[in-house]
Amino acid sequence: MILYAHAGLDAAAVSRQLAEGTRGIVVAGVGEGNMPESVRQELARLAARGICVVRASRADEGLVDREPEDAGNGFVAARALNPQKARILLQLLLAAGESDPAAIQRAFDGR
């Protein structure tokens, strides 16, 4: 699923959008994949439960680099992929049985 970050988005709205069995979320964040703090906290909780969270940007250009908090949150940075392309790569990785955020990050890094 792609979750579009916007002003007023909160943790409850994130939870309402999740389908049972969701294995991955791509956040179409503002700027470099940023989101409201309450949303970040909710997504970190979901990542701790095994749902892969990929930070992407809804801006036309630019990279979403790893941030120091990504490792602790269990997030993956989409790098140069827009949310739609990040979703496709994440779907392929999950379908192939990959669930380790570090391995998924390597795929997004092109390694």
Image (cartoon, rainbow, N blue to C red):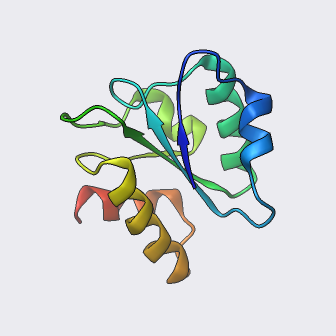
Q: What percent of the width, then of the height, locates residue 49? A: 76, 53
Question: Residue at (45%, 57%) from the top-left corner?
Answer: 102
Q: What percent of the width, then of the height, locates residue 11? A: 74, 29
Give the total number of marks visible in the rendering.
Answer: 0
Q: Tell which of 18 and 38 is nearer to you.
A: 18
Horizontal side of 101 relative to 21 (left or right) equals left
Question: Residue at (78%, 41%) from the top-left corner?
Answer: 15
Horizontal side of 41 relative to 67 (left or right) equals right
Q: Quadrant of residue 13?
A: top right
Q: Which quadrant: the C terminus?
A: bottom left
Q: Quadrant of residue 100?
A: bottom right
Q: Tell which of 55 and 3 is nearer to you.
A: 3
Horizontal side of 16 relative to 86 (left or right) equals right
Horizontal side of 94 relative to 29 (left or right) equals right
Question: Residue at (18%, 35%) from the top-left corner?
Answer: 61
Q: What percent of the width, then of the height, locates residue 60? A: 22, 35
Question: Residue at (22%, 47%) from the top-left corner?
Answer: 80
Q: What percent of the width, then of the height, locates residue 76? A: 45, 48
Q: Which quadrant: the N terminus?
A: bottom right
Q: Tell which of 6 and 99 is nearer to you.
A: 6
| As drawn, 109 above or below 63 | below
| As drawn, 59 above or below 95 | above
In the current view of this chain or complex, which residue is farthest to the left?
61
In the current view of this chain or complex, which residue is farthest to the bottom?
96
